[in-house]
Image (spheres, rainbow, N blue to C red):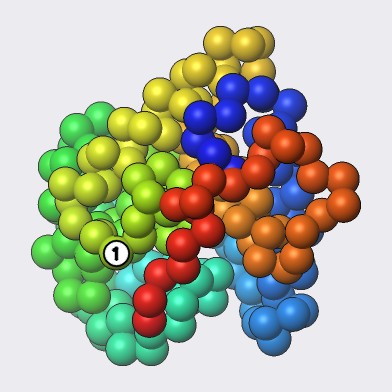
Amino acid sequence: MDLGCSDASVWKEALSLYPSRIQTLSVKKNKPDLVSLDDFYCNQLPLLLHQRNPNPFITTPELSTLMQWKLTRGKWRPRLLDFVSSLDDAVVKSASQKAFQSLPDVSKAVSELTVLKGVGPATASAVLATFAPHLTPFMSDEAMEAALGSSKDYSLKQYIKFVDKLQRKAEELSSEGDSFTPSDVERALWSFAVGQSSGPQADQDPKTKPSRSSKRKRKN
């Protein structure tokens, strides 16, 4: 889906299909844990984090499960999971607490998390997105392709550009009377991309036709 699409109904449709896309990916790609992992990431973890206000933090087991979600929804890289799972819990709690307290300074928040072994800007974005979806979207391949035309550069600099574009799109879509967060925009882009990879839909709206850049696939 082209990030330039301004039809809120198209975005709402793509976002509404997110749960079914997760289910489809789970079955077609033989990822039986994806549905439960996505429920943990989207529903359970945000509640846990906000219950810890005013000094929220994430634990090592929670970060490990988040990493499982990230790798299962995307590309599996077991070494990252090993790194994260072996982190000292006190260190993870301290780093994440500093990160959450740094918001809305996204750059500083990401930097506080990337001191942890195995945590790069993409994983840091996943942590921040589950706590502050109104500020920090997850840096997924599919959304990066749609927003920036490439998913090869996962630097902090690129993430800041990505955040700016998705925040602007969320504001634009919300101005029509609907409520969109940058994380909603990311999930809609991911949902649409996964739907496209499953084959063209007969009732596809021309406005949702992906740009050339959104068709590019990340090289493994």
Residue beneath the point at 26% across and 47% down: 159
Find numbered disc 1 in the image and state the secondary structure of the residue it sits on. Answer: loop
Residue beneath the point at 68% across and 33% down: 207
Residue beneath the point at 54% across and 39% down: 2
Judging depth in this view, the residue of 100 and 67 nearest the camera is 67
The residue to which callout 1 is attached is 152
- Give the residue at the far right of this rendering: 202
Residue 88 visible? The answer is yes
Q: Quarter-wise, where is residue 64 in the image?
A: bottom left
Answer left or right for 133 relative to 159: right
Quadrant holding the N terminus: top right
Residue 15 in the image, given as x and y percentages of width and height: 68, 42
Quadrant holding the C terminus: bottom left
Residue 186 in the image, given as x and y percentages of width and height: 51, 45
Q: Quarter-wise, where is residue 82 in the image?
A: bottom left
Residue beneath the point at 77% across and 59% down: 200
Answer left or right for 44 relative to 208: left
- Type of residue at label 1? Lys
Judging depth in this view, the residue of 206 and 49 nearest the camera is 206
Judging depth in this view, the residue of 175 and 44 nearest the camera is 175
Answer left or right for 150 relative to 9: left
Judging depth in this view, the residue of 14 and 124 nearest the camera is 14
